[in-house]
Image (spheres, helix red, strand yellow):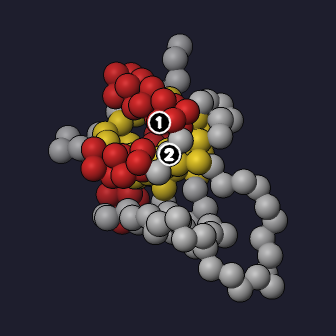
Amino acid sequence: MTAPAFAVTFDDAALSEDLAHATAPGRIVALDARRQFAAHGIDIALLRPCQDDARDATRLPGCVKTYLPAPIGDWGMVFEGRLDEHGRPFMHCLAFGRRHPYAPPNPASTSSPPSDSRPRKPPADATATAQFARSALTLR
């Protein structure tokens, strides 16, 4: 028995912007993942919850991520759960990029995020995200 998988959609303009900031190896990883996810979906076991508010000021409430190449690669994709017109959950890719290096948070730090960090789009529809979460739980 295979694990449940979600269909995946991509915003071509957003992915192109992220690829413009990626290294050549990162672009290869992203494009390979896109081909795989578009053809086969993403296995629910590969998804990890995002922190609502990350140390670098990125805001991703209700989003999930996967590491690329799986299972613990140096890059990642962030997804928002959505529902199609028939109420079936799917993943929409919001961003691709290099994973954050682990560093314990420094509460005394007042420095701002690096200039190349761009704010990411929060989920556009909180109701759809909540419905997706409920639907996803029934797939486990």
**Total numbered badges shown on the rendered structure:** 2
Q: Residue furthest top?
A: 1
Which residue sits at x=61%, y=30%?
A: 70
Q: x%, y% of residue 13?
A: 27, 50
Q: Foreground: 35 or 27?
A: 27
Which residue sits at x=45%, y=26%?
A: 32
**Can residue 21 be seen by looking at this rendering?**
yes
Residue matched to label 1: 27
**Amino acid bearing label 2:** Ala
**Left or right for 114, reference 121:** right
Residue matched to label 2: 22
Q: x%, y% of residue 116?
A: 52, 65
Whole-number angstrom distance, CA of label 2 to CA of label 1? 6 Å
**Amino acid bearing label 1:** Arg
Are the residues flagged by discs 2 and 1 in contact, CB closer than 8 Å?
yes
Q: Residue furthest left?
A: 85
